[in-house]
Amino acid sequence: MPPLLPLLLVLRSRTAHSYSRSVSSLVTLLRRRRSMATVASTDPASPTNTRVGWIGTGIMGRSMCAHLLNAGYTVTVFNRTLSKAQPLLDIGAHLADSPHSLASQSDVVFSIVGYPSDVRHVLLHPSSGALSGLRPGGIIVDMTTSEPSLASELSAAASSKNCSAIDAPVSGGDRGAKTGTLAIFAGGDESVVQKLNPLFALMGKVNYMGGSGKGQFAKLANQITIATTMVGLVEGMVYAHKAGLNVELFLNAISTGAAGSKSLDLHGSRILKRDFEPGFFVNHFVKDLGICLKECQNMGLALPGLALAQQLYLSLKAHGEGNLGTQALILALERLNNVRLDNAVASKPSA
């Protein structure tokens, strides 16, 4: 019979060797799974691997979200006014009672709300905000036109939770939202934007602008361009009217020349019909231009065209016209000149 002590030593050695091999195998397995998860996390979004949350179902958000539902994505929505979410519920969306609850059921959360304060509340509120309910690896996409500094703050907050945040404001108005032809300005991690491309493609064309906040800077530059273009459009219309031209014929004539623009295409006929239904609210445009002026001050930039446009739009708000569409700028120019384009279409040139 072998001595007891040597036998115990042999058994302990074999046990230790077996334990070491088991630990080594477990570590290898975990590494493999982590590697597989990393690969999976970079897979493009699809209805089979991505649950979507959508916060904000107003004029723009409702149409944008509908494209995702129609493409087969599982979508959970949240909106403060339930009636505005009802059309999406009717075509298969689920309803959440808070941004936190919505995010806990989602892999990607989109938001498109009114003001930076709304963005902060629905995304960053410590108990009810979406980020507080999002699992590690989740993505927040804020499509509100907001402050670049807030986009950077959101990105940092998301990173601290092992999540990602993309700023992706849009341009194209209600028509672009309905037809899925929006221009999307994306800022943040480019690989995350690429992962989201299948979702963005349902809403329009995504343009990667750079790191966090660059999407917002691009949208603000876009708003500056639109604001001064709109001033030129309505001034040209008032001038043509005062000169005795048929304004409808005038707009048709310039639409194919150098003065043609998307603003003319979207708003020219609406102005002539006195159709001021909002594709984009004056109130929200005043907010956007205010952010632009604030950023100009930070940069030491003087943009007098922007300042003038902001004042004209602000005058609409002062007259109680903030809930009209941005094409209502014609009202400010009519008041300044004591004219009205009511008969702009009626008169035809004589032979």
Image (tube, helix red, strand yellow):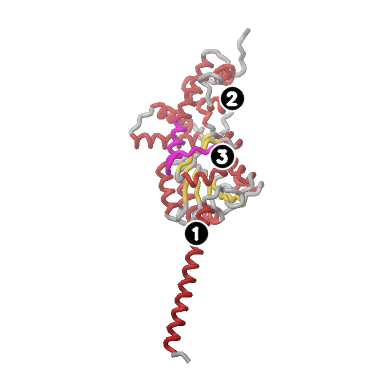
Q: Tell me: 212 left or right of 351.
A: left
Q: Is residue 118 visible?
A: no
User: To which residue does mark 2 refer?
Assistant: 269
Compare marks 1 and 3 and give the one earlier in the sequence.
1
Count neighbours of disc 3 (C-alpha within 10 A) and say few if under 14, some if 14 to 19, many if 20 or more: many
Region rendered in magenta: 203-224
Q: Position of residue 73 (x, y in %)?
A: 61, 48
Q: Quadrant of the C terminus?
A: top right
Q: Position of residue 216 (x, y in %)?
A: 45, 39
Count neighbours of disc 1 (C-alpha within 10 A) and say few if under 14, some if 14 to 19, many if 20 or more: few
| Residue 203 vertical placement versus 50 (above, below) | above
| Residue 100 vertical placement versus 337 (above, below) | below
Proximity of marks 3 and 2: CB atoms separated by less than 8 Å? no
Q: Position of residue 269 (x, y in %)?
A: 59, 24
User: To which residue does mark 3 refer?
Assistant: 60
User: Given this view, does label 1 or label 3 mark the residue nearer the observer?
Assistant: 1
* Disc 3, SS: helix
Q: Position of residue 84 (x, y in %)?
A: 60, 44
